[in-house]
């Protein structure tokens, strides 16, 4: 199973998946990394790992349709089977969504459907969880469709919210679990335990 990544910033979840592949815990190959941020740590990680990488954004492709085509072309050229979003801050274009329908995954640092949607990313999520007085949070691996954080849920892990938690302490506790559940979910896809609707195209 070939995995293509889309990442905007640090790419720590991407690194966790790559590490799982290298260690044999995930029977898949990381084949391409695309970032909309030319200075992202994700692109640095790709270069360190020897994975082909591309900066594709509104800067390189001002026309949204052209950018959509460029992202799709890169994924197809590297024979990607499954697309893993790792902190990718842009909506995917219709061509990429259509071609990989049912085969694009994302991880969200809360228990969807709670605390998802537009604007709910990074520390904003953890701030919202604490403000709501939640007793637990967690991470959700889900399929990506046209709406933010609305695709079918594939896996969830629960993380307690501790008394005195700050968004930063909660984020750190959730991230540890993200790095476990994302590769584990991809392994279930690789072994056929989870069957994606878009597979076998």
Image (cartoon, rainbow, N blue to C red):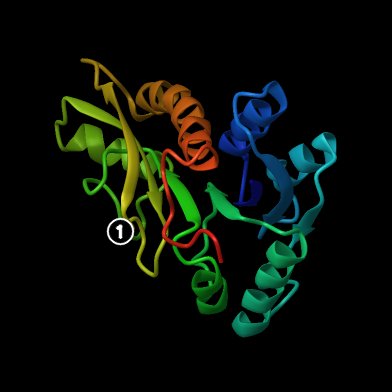
Q: Position of residue 151 (x, y in %)?
A: 33, 58
Could you say which is closer to the camera, residue 175 or residue 194? 194
What's the residue at 57%, 53% (across, down)? 82
Work out whether 166 lies above or below 194: above
Q: Position of residue 20 (x, y in %)?
A: 63, 27
Judge left or right: residue 19 versus residue 197: right
Q: Is residue 184 visible?
A: yes
Could you say which is closer to the camera, residue 57 or residue 18? 18
User: At numbered mark 1, what does the secondary structure look like: helix, strand or loop?
Assistant: loop
Q: Position of residue 3 (x, y in %)?
A: 64, 48
How many labels were placed on the picture? 1
Could you say which is closer to the camera, residue 163 or residue 158? 158
**Callout 1 environment at 10 Å: few (<14), some (14 to 19), or many (20+)?**
some
What's the residue at 56%, 35% (across, down)? 13
What's the residue at 68%, 82% (across, down)? 66
Work out whether 164 lies above or below 104: above
Q: Position of residue 163 (x, y in %)?
A: 21, 15
Q: Farthest top residue?
A: 163
Which residue matches tag 1? 150
Among the 4 quarters of the image, the one containing residue 76: bottom right
Work out whether 194 lies above or below 145: above
What's the residue at 30%, 37% (across, down)? 127
Judge left or right: residue 127 versus residue 4: left
Judge left or right: residue 146 versus residue 93: left
């Amino acid at each position: 199973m070939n995995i293509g990544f889309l990442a905007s910033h640090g790419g720590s979840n991407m690194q966790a998946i790559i590490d799982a592949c290298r260690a044999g815990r995930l029977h898949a190959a990381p084949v391409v990394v695309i970032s909309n941020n030319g200075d992202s740590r994700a692109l640095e990680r790709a270069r360190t790992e020897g994975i082909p990488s591309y900066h594709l954004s509104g800067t390189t492709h001002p026309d949204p349709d052209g950018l959509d085509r460029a992202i799709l072309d890169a994924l197809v050229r590297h024979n990607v089977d499954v697309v893993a979003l790792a902190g990718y801050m842009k909506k995917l274009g219709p061509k990429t969504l259509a071609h990989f329908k049912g085969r694009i995954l994302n991880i969200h640092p809360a228990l969807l459907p709670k605390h998802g949607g537009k604007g709910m990313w990074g520390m904003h999520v953890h701030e919202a969880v604490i403000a709501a007085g939640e007793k637990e949070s967690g991470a959700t691996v889900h399929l990506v469709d046209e709406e933010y954080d609305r695709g079918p849920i594939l896996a969830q892990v629960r993380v307690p919210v501790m008394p005195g938690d700050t968004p930063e302490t909660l984020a750190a506790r959730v991230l540890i679990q993200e790095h476990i559940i994302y590769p584990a979910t991809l392994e279930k896809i690789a072994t056929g335990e989870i069957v994606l609707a878009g597979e076998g195209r």
